[in-house]
Image (spheres, rainbow, N blue to C red):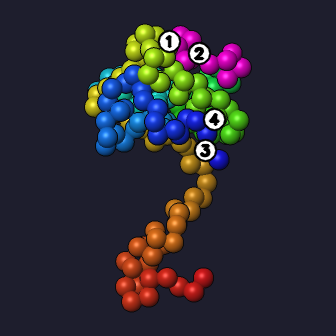
């Protein structure tokens, strides 16, 4: 079910997010692991908005999102790197209730006229200056046949005349 965070009429104070062909408008806030390109900085979680990335932990620790204390505490704990290093596995495992609360906090803070703009401005990194890393640790078998279209495309490589087998 879609909620108000997907309202196509909403605009962001991040100007590049409002461009007609923007990949990351306020309605599409994808997560990533990043650091400034060529820097020795630790990888950290970010959220794309327009041509920028919000350093999520910096935003949460600086109370720049205006998230409720429980959401802030849970997201911060979910994003803490473990012995294997940083990844979004903890956040993914936290479940839809936390994802929704975090998305709402991000959306409210990024809307035009949001009171959080001055604080969040200091948490932005230009996407063009970022280096990305694999966002999740894949622990075991992963089936990359995500759709019939993908299975057909791979099948054509091996069986051009009969790409999909009956199963």
Q: Nearer the viewer, mark 4 or mark 3?
A: 3
Can the viewer see residue 93 in this picture?
yes
Q: Which residues are magenta?
A: 59-71
CA gap, disc 2 to disc 1? 9 Å
Q: Which comes before the other along the chain, label 1 or label 3?
A: 3
Q: Which comes before the other along the chain, label 4 or label 3?
A: 3
Residue occupying image coordinates x 46% and y 10%: 119
Q: Nearer the viewer, residue 87 or 109?
A: 109
> Circle 2 is placed at which residue position?
66
Where residue 55 appears, as percent x and y from the top left, is 45, 22
Question: Element at badge 3?
Answer: loop
Where residue 105 appears, as percent x and y from the top left, is 58, 24
Vertical comparison of 31 with 68: above or below: below
Q: Nearer the viewer, mark 2 or mark 1?
A: 1
Which of the labelled discs sits on residue 155, or is there none? none
Vertical comparison of 103 with 149: above or below: above
* Proximity of marks 2 and 1: CB atoms separated by less than 8 Å: yes
Which of the labelled discs sits on residue 99, or is there none? 4
CA gap, disc 2 to disc 3? 22 Å
CA gap, disc 2 to disc 4? 15 Å
Q: Which comes before the other along the chain, label 2 or label 4?
A: 2
CA gap, disc 1 to disc 4? 22 Å
Which of the labelled discs sits on residue 2, or is there none? 3
In the rendered image, residue 33 lying in the magenta stretch gets the answer: no
Q: Which comes before the other along the chain, label 2 or label 3?
A: 3
């Amino acid at each position: 079910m879609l909620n108000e965070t997907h309202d196509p009429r909403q605009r962001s104070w991040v100007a590049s997010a409002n461009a007609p062909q923007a990949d990351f408008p306020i309605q599409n806030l994808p997560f990533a692991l990043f650091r400034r390109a060529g820097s020795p900085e630790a990888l950290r979680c970010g959220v794309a908005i327009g041509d920028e990335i919000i350093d999520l932990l910096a935003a949460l620790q600086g109370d720049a999102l205006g998230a409720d204390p429980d959401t802030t505490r849970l997201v911060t704990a979910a994003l803490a790197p473990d012995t294997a290093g940083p990844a979004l596995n903890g956040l993914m495992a936290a479940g839809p209730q936390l994802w929704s609360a975090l998305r709402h906090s991000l959306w409210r803070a990024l809307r035009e006229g949001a009171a959080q703009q001055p604080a969040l401005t200091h948490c932005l990194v230009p996407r063009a200056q970022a280096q990305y890393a694999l966002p999740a640790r894949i622990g075991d078998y992963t089936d990359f046949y995500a759709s019939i279209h993908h299975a057909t495309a791979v099948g054509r490589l091996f069986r051009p005349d009969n790409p999909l087998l009956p199963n």
